[in-house]
């Protein structure tokens, strides 16, 4: 689905949203599968179903992503305000950033993200989620960021 979306539009913002959605989904899926396996293991060992822990929510793609997806697949136009993120919102999680939250700004494009979000993203991509400039997690490589 993510690949299909990416192949049906050239908008770089859509590609970024699709990539991020995929990365989020993969994480949730892995967690879910792990929990299921753990439960099977427990039932095998104890033959007791009461030991089973409740499963996390089954992984789903976000509403935002689904909306964009169907609009693009059906060739409906997307307004730039739908994909553009205001500067007070984290570019990764799209939540509003408040002044007491630690943030990280890209030196190149000046996009600001939550420090937490950037850190998770950088563990996988090692580049700015917006401009794709090479970026390292300042937590892991504190000296390189200066
Ligand atoms: Zn964030
Ligand atoms: Zn950037």
Image: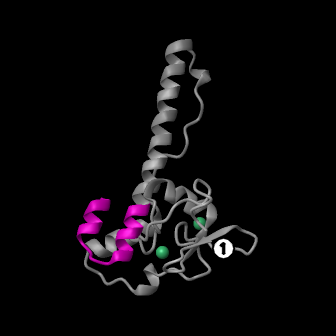
Residue range highlighted in magenta = 1-20
Give the main secondary structure, helix, strand or loop, of the magenta stretch.
helix
Name above or below for residue 45 compared with residue 124. above
| Residue at figure coordinates x 27%, y 77% from the top left | 10
State which quadrant residue 107 falls in.
Answer: bottom right
Number of numbered discs visible in the structure rendering? 1
| Residue at figure coordinates x 32%, y 78% from the top left | 11
Residue 92 horizontal/vertical position (percent): 52, 67
Residue 123 horizontal/vertical position (percent): 50, 54
Left or right of 100? Residue 61 is left
Q: Residues within 10 Å of mark 1 (few under 14, many from 20)?
A: some
Considering depth in this image, is 59 or 115 the residue closer to the camera?
A: 115
Considering depth in this image, is 107 or 42 the residue closer to the camera?
A: 107
State which quadrant residue 144 falls in.
Answer: bottom right
Considering depth in this image, is 70 or 83 the residue closer to the camera?
A: 83
| Residue at figure coordinates x 52%, y 26% from the top left | 39
Queried on whether the Cβ of the residue with tag 1 lies below 8 angstroms from ligand 1, the answer reads yes
Q: Quadrant of the N terminus?
A: bottom left
The residue that label 1 is drawn on is: 97
Q: Is residue 145 magenta?
A: no
Residue 44 horizontal/vertical position (percent): 49, 15
| Residue at figure coordinates x 46%, y 86% from the top left | 81
Q: Is residue 16 magenta?
A: yes
Coloring scheme used: one colour
């Amino acid at each position: 689905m993510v690949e299909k979306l990416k192949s049906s539009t050239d908008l770089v913002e859509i590609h970024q949203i699709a990539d991020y959605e995929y990365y989020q989904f993969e994480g949730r899926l892995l967690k879910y599968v792990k929990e299921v396996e753990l439960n099977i293991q427990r039932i095998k060992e104890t033959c007791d179903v009461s030991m089973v822990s409740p499963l996390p929510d089954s992984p789903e793609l976000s509403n935002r992503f689904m909306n964009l997806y169907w609009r693009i697949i059906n060739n409906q136009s997307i307004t730039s305000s739908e994909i553009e993120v205001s500067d007070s919102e984290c570019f990764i999680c799209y939540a509003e950033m408040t002044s007491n939250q630690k943030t990280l700004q890209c030196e190149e494009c000046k996009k600001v993200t939550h420090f937490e979000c950037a850190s998770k993203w950088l563990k996988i991509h090692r580049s700015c989620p917006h401009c794709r400039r090479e970026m390292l997690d300042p937590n892991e490589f504190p000296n390189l960021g200066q």
